[in-house]
Amino acid sequence: MMVSPALLYHKISRRALVGQAILPAAAFQAALLTLCVALAAQTLPPKNLSLVVGKGQLLQFNNDVSRVVLAEPKIADAVVVGPREVMVNAKSTGKTTLVIWEAGSLPATYDISVTSDTSDLDALRRLIQASVPTANVTGNADTLVLTGTALNADDSKRAQALASTHAKTVVNLLQLPPAAEPRQILLQVKFASMARPSARCKAAIYCRFWPSPT
């Protein structure tokens, strides 16, 4: 059974009379410690609340909300939009804690975790991998990084062009396969022997060359 904090404090108040006598200071401190322990035992376990930057969630309560406290306003904010409704909006990535006091109930604690919205990045990754299956995309709206491998230079340029439509800067780290070694061609050229009055000669010339790669 939950004990009202106000009732506990009233019972142990230093000004409370016990047989027309004021409660001694030492007894008051001991009673106040008992009150703190009782309140701690009645604290509700925190609830987890996961949000995405730019989005929010409406919290609804059975009784009127009397107070709202947020640990880090840079990560999220909480707006009381009605007597029994609080809107929590995610502002930046990180974690924070929200505490809401509801009339007739213990404070409700929320552990808020805010993450980035990756829906656009996921869609771009699927688009690029449809053309270059071995490519991967990481980064944000300002800078994207392409990693992995591409079959050829055309695939690498295609992936970079797609990424450039979603970010200001694209870092292309796609690896291309090593170039094939040029083929060696051996030619054998023979000259017919010629008879001369002074001497007879026969010559053979062998040539080896490497064609320039296409």
Image (tube, rainbow, N blue to C red):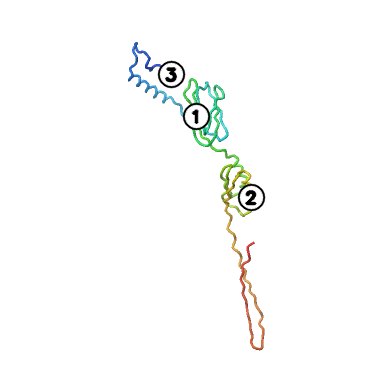
Foreground label between 1 and 2: 1
In contact (CB < 8 Å): disc 3 and disc 2: no
Is residue 82 placed above or below 122 in the rendered structure?
above
Is residue 115 placed above or below 14 in the rendered structure?
below
Q: What distance separates the C-alpha of mark 1 from that of mark 2?
A: 47 Å
Instruction: Give whichever of 53, 5 is nearer the camera.
Output: 53
Q: Position of residue 153 (x, y in %)?
A: 62, 54
Say left or right for 213 vs 80: right
**In percent of the image, x 49 and y 20: which residue is there?**
103
Residue 87, picture quadrant: top right
For the residue carrying disc 2, how many other residues have a C-alpha within 10 Å: few (<14), some (14-19), or many (20+)?
some
Is residue 193 placed above or below 83 in the rendered structure?
below
Q: Earlier in the sequence, mark 3 or mark 2?
A: 3
Q: What distance separates the C-alpha of mark 1 from that of mark 3?
A: 24 Å
**In percent of the image, x 39 and y 22: which residue is there?**
35
Q: Amino acid under label 2? A: Arg
Say left or right for 100 vs 172: left
Query: Which residue is denoted by mark 2 in the rendering?
Result: 158
Q: Amino acid under label 1? A: Leu
Q: Earlier in the sequence, mark 1 or mark 3?
A: 3
For the residue carrying disc 3, how many other residues have a C-alpha within 10 Å: few (<14), some (14-19), or many (20+)?
few
Callout 2 secondary element: helix
Query: Which residue is denoted by mark 3 in the rendering?
Result: 6
Query: Which residue is denoted by mark 1 in the rendering?
Result: 70
Q: Quadrant of the N terminus?
A: top left
Is there any visible trace of residue 1 in the rendered image? no
Number of numbered discs overlaid on the protein picture: 3
Residue 12, picture quadrant: top left
Callout 3 secondary element: helix
Q: Amino acid under label 3? A: Ala
Most extreme residue toward the top is 20
Is there any visible trace of residue 81 in the rendered image? yes
